[in-house]
Image: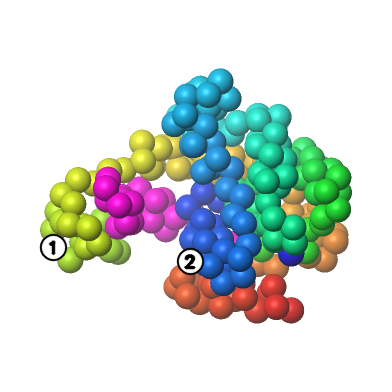
Amino acid sequence: MDIILLGPPGAGKGTQAQRLVEAHGMRQLSTGDMLRAAVKAGTAVGLQAKAVMDRGELVSDEIVSALIGEELDAMGAGQGAIFDGYPRTAAQAESLDAILAARGRKLEHVIELEVDEDALVERICGRFTCANCGKGYHDKFEQPRQPGVCDKCGSHEFKRRPDDNEDTVRTRMAEYRAKTAPILPIYDARGIVTRVNGMAEIDHVTAAIERIIKG
């Protein structure tokens, strides 16, 4: 089963994708993670993408499509894919159709996580992680039990993503509205779109997605 999790940055796509991976053995194809890995590795594609990502803008379709194709080819036979953060544009939606068809695959569900923009800004700008183990926290919603000490590993070092600031978040929201939202009619016409309240409790969102994919 191949599905798309759709929604603006910070809507919770990554969290829900990971839960699907654990429950169903699917493979999460997160363009954000793949691009960050390329940036960290210092590849030519990574360096090109870094300048764009730092501005809160979207990387080129060519870069993203190439990464997606490579990931699909590396997957096991019969393994389902979760597209997290892709496609973002109508052109990418067309490209994804071609990428999947060439491999005998097709989309079965498009699940949109709907959010409130102001609440989403608060959610994103307040998040931080342990620099050692990666456990996530939030200024308002999830502080470490002991201030300054990671609950999981005891580290005293924490970090924030440089693009987790209000200006960048609102730029990305505007990009989403302008370029990604228009792809929904493409999938609506196929009858495969379902919308879920992305601001609900995480477990409630997970339960709603499970109902969708189990039909």
Residue in view at x 55 percent, y 40 percent: 34
Q: Is residue 132 magenta?
A: yes
Specify the quadrant that holds the C terminus.
Answer: bottom right
Residue in view at x 61 percent, y 66 percent: 25
Q: Kindly indicate the quadrant of the structure image that contains residue 188.
A: bottom right
Image spot of residue 130 (x, y percent):
27, 50
In the image, residue 205 above or below residue 166: below
SS for callout 1: loop
Specify the quadrant that holds the N terminus.
Answer: bottom right
Give the amino acid at mark 2: Met
Which tag, 1 or 2, sits closer to the chain's start?
Answer: 1
The residue tagged 1 is: 146
Residue in view at x 65 percent, y 30 percent: 63
Q: Kindly indicate the quadrant of the structure image that contains residue 108.
A: bottom right
Give the amino acid at mark 1: Gln
Mark 2 crowd level (few <14, some 14–19, many ≥20, 10 Å Cα): some
Q: Nearer the viewer, residue 15 or 200?
A: 15
SS for callout 2: loop
Image spot of residue 54 (x, y percent):
45, 29
Mark 1 crowd level (few <14, some 14–19, many ≥20, 10 Å Cα): few
Start-end of magenta stretch = 113-137
Q: Is residue 108 rendered to the left or right of residue 57?
A: right
Q: Kindly indicate the quadrant of the structure image that contains residue 7.
A: bottom right
Q: Is residue 48 rendered to the left or right of residue 112?
A: left
Q: Which mark is residue 199?
A: 2
In the image, residue 36 above or below residue 158: above
In front of the other: label 1 or label 2?
1
Q: Is residue 164 magenta?
A: no
Image spot of residue 141 (x, y percent):
30, 64
Residue in view at x 46 percent, y 70 percent: 202
